[in-house]
Amino acid sequence: MIDKETGSIRLSDTCQLHAGDALPDVSTFPASEIQQVVDHKNGWQWLTSKNLVVDGQYIILSLGYYANALQQIELIVSQDRFDLTVGCDSWSEQNELDIRTALRVWLRNELGREGRFAWGEAQASYDPKGGYSSIGIRYR
């Protein structure tokens, strides 16, 4: 899914994301349960897709565009479909830390390691303010 040499993301045979790409026409993006574009009116726009299936895995994918150029990606990967109806009642910090561990393993399988690359950086982390774990990719 992640190209080690370029940091590009392959979502399907016909959809690949590259650093600097313009915000895609949402109608041409692979199908997912929820898809939305949020314009923060400060130069940043975010395209989020939930329960996107890539290589048999479920993905929550958020693409950050600044001045209409792809700059950041945030993703969560799971073998199981994400239950998008679950509320905060089932949340626990330990569960999110376990998710971070699983995401680190997934990222190492994809790229060989976390950290800085010629094309940018990739790291799995837990955000205590947001209360969730994800993989962050930032392009140079």
Image (spheres, helix red, strand yellow):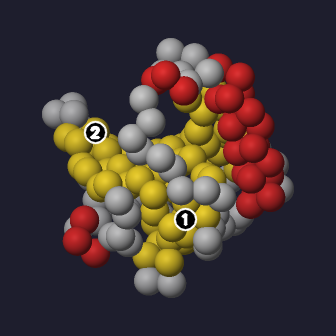
Residue denoted by label 1: 9
Residue denoted by label 2: 44
Q: Residue at x 65, y 58 (%)?
A: 79
To which quarter of the image does residue 94 belong?
top right
Pointer 1: residues within 10 angstroms few (<14), some, or many (20+)? Answer: some
What is the CA distance from the residue labelled 2 to the residue labelled 1?
Answer: 20 Å
Horizontal placement of 30 versus 110: left or right?
left
Q: Label 1 is placed on what type of residue? A: Ile
Q: Position of residue 133 (x, y in %)?
A: 60, 33
Check the image and report above or below for 43 versus 117.
above
Quadrant occupied by the N terminus: bottom right
Check the image and report above or below for 3 versus 92.
below
Q: Residue at x 31, y 45 (%)?
A: 46
Q: Residue at x 77, y 37 (%)?
A: 101
Element on which disc 1 rests: strand
Element on which disc 2 rests: strand
Q: Position of residue 125 (x, y in %)?
A: 66, 31
Pointer 2: residues within 10 angstroms few (<14), some, or many (20+)? Answer: some
Q: Residue at x 74, y 33 (%)?
A: 98
Horizontal placement of 100 versus 32: left or right?
right
Q: Which residue is at the front of the view, 3 or 56?
A: 56
Q: Residue furthest top?
A: 129
Horizontal placement of 136 versus 23: left or right?
right
The answer to whether residue 27 shows anywhere in this view is: yes
